[in-house]
Image (spheres, rainbow, N blue to C red):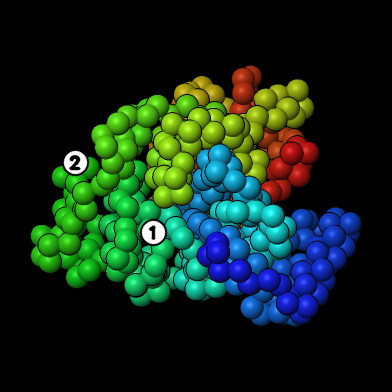
Amino acid sequence: MAGNSDPLTPRAKLAVTAGKAVAAASRAAGRGSGSVIGGRVALKLDPDLLHRLAAHLDVTLVSATNGKTTTTRLIAEALKAAGPVVSNALGANMPAGITSALAAGEDARYGVIEVDEKYLVGVAQATEPKCIALLNLSRDQLDRAAETRMLAEAWREGLAGSKAVIVANADDPLVVWAASSSPNVIWVAAGQMWKDDAWSCPSCGGVMQRPGDDWFCGECGFRRPTPSWALSGDHVLDPHGSAWPIHLQLPGRANKANAASSAAVAAVFGVPPQVALERMYQVQAVAGRYDVVQFQGRDLRLLLAKNPAGWLETFSLIDPPPTPVILSVNARSADGTDTSWLWDVDYTRLTGHPICVIGDRKLDLAVRLEVADQQFQVCENLDQAVQMSPPGRIEVIANYTAFQDLRRRVGN
């Protein structure tokens, strides 16, 4: 934490220099940002480097299944009102990528770090954060990550007794279960659109009762805590009951929820809600998400949706029918190789939209759309899908590696 000065040792300085050199070589070779390979090399040379790089920072960690990249960006913008910030803005959220990001933060006061759910506990032990934001937990990459209840249990055990202030979503029972072992929790009513991973009690396994926005277990008494911050329409309610307007350039209710959690985090560091929310307006897109790009004379809005919860939120913000939609799904290692999650997505919400399907697993998606009684065309690539889409701005929804493929194709 800030104040616990831990100047870099000669070995650490060598590790940082070597990591930056390898990252630069990777970029020059056209193999991406180089942050991951650079971080791996640096950590190989100094396994304690992440701890050393975080020692002079007031660190915030952000973890969730959905929304962590955007929320990290919003928090970083808010905290810039209080001092220089270093952040892994491009989403490299495992220890190697985080190490690379912090290596550029010699002059920063705050570190705002997105962390993959599986690595949260280890990164928290290394960086000794002042604040940890926990947004949501739902099924994602089940061939790589643990089942959601197991992941929540790992968080609960790993964060027990943590000195960090935990800012947690009171509307997600799994997050509440995970955060409840910590002595200092700030609850935020950020909402939960996707509920299909939270019908059984994480405490006892009983059936959850979910009247309205409330939830509780009738068997063991585990229940929704009283929030001190809340999203209410287009406003954030602070612990004093004051309502602060949310003005974002990012679309959708989910991003308003992200802003509410971000305002609560900013307040931990003394940044008032009005200042924090005003600064968040500066964010127009996040690592390509929500960007509107020109391609073949058409406007395409690029939207990332990686799992059932993310697709549900994305469907809620696209323009209404007959807006054309292009869907792209891959199943590479970074996505998770199991596509069975497609059957958990309610594709009937696309009824009335002209749909084109692309991506490595376009036929898997086509079968799912056929069962959902949707009208669609299977296309070989983005170029063909754009040509076959009727006039108007096209909403392009893709999972992780498919999204990166699209960004490269449109030059974004």
Q: Is residue 150 visible?
A: no
Q: Nearer the viewer, residue 376 or 290?
A: 290
Element on which disc 2 rests: loop
Q: Which residue is mark 1?
A: 165
Q: 10 Å neighbourhood of mark 1: few (<14), some, or many (≥20)?
A: some
Instruction: Name the residue located 65 percent from the left edge and 44 percent from the top edge.
Output: 287
Where's residue 30, x and y in %? 85, 55
Rendered view: 52 above or below 104: below
Q: Is residue 227 visible?
A: yes
Q: In the image as oriented, which residue stretches furthest toward the top?
A: 391
Element on which disc 1 rests: strand
Rendered view: 129 above or below 373: below
Where's residue 371, x and y in %? 43, 45
Where's residue 247, x and y in %? 47, 27
Q: Is 45 on the left or on the right of 283, as rendered?
A: right
Res 313 quadrant in image? top left
Res 189 quadrant in image? top left
Which numbered disc, 1 or 2, marks the residue that appears first in the sequence? Answer: 1
Q: 10 Å neighbourhood of mark 2: few (<14), some, or many (≥20)?
A: few
Q: Is 121 on the left or on the right of 82, as rendered?
A: left
Tag on residue 212?
2
**Image quarter (top left, top right, bottom left or bottom right) of the C terminus:** top right
* Residues at discs 1 and 2 in contact (Cβ within 8 Å): no
Measure how far apart labels 1 and 2 are at the Cα level.
28 Å
Where's residue 219, x and y in %? 10, 65
Instruction: Name the residue located 43 percent from the left edge and 31 percent from the top edge.
Output: 274
Q: Amino acid at mark 1?
A: Val
Tag on residue 89?
none
Q: Amino acid at mark 2?
A: Gly
Instruction: Name the residue located 62 percent from the left edge and 49 percent from the top edge.
Output: 85
Instruction: Name the residue located 50 percent from the left edge and 30 percent from the top edge.
Output: 278
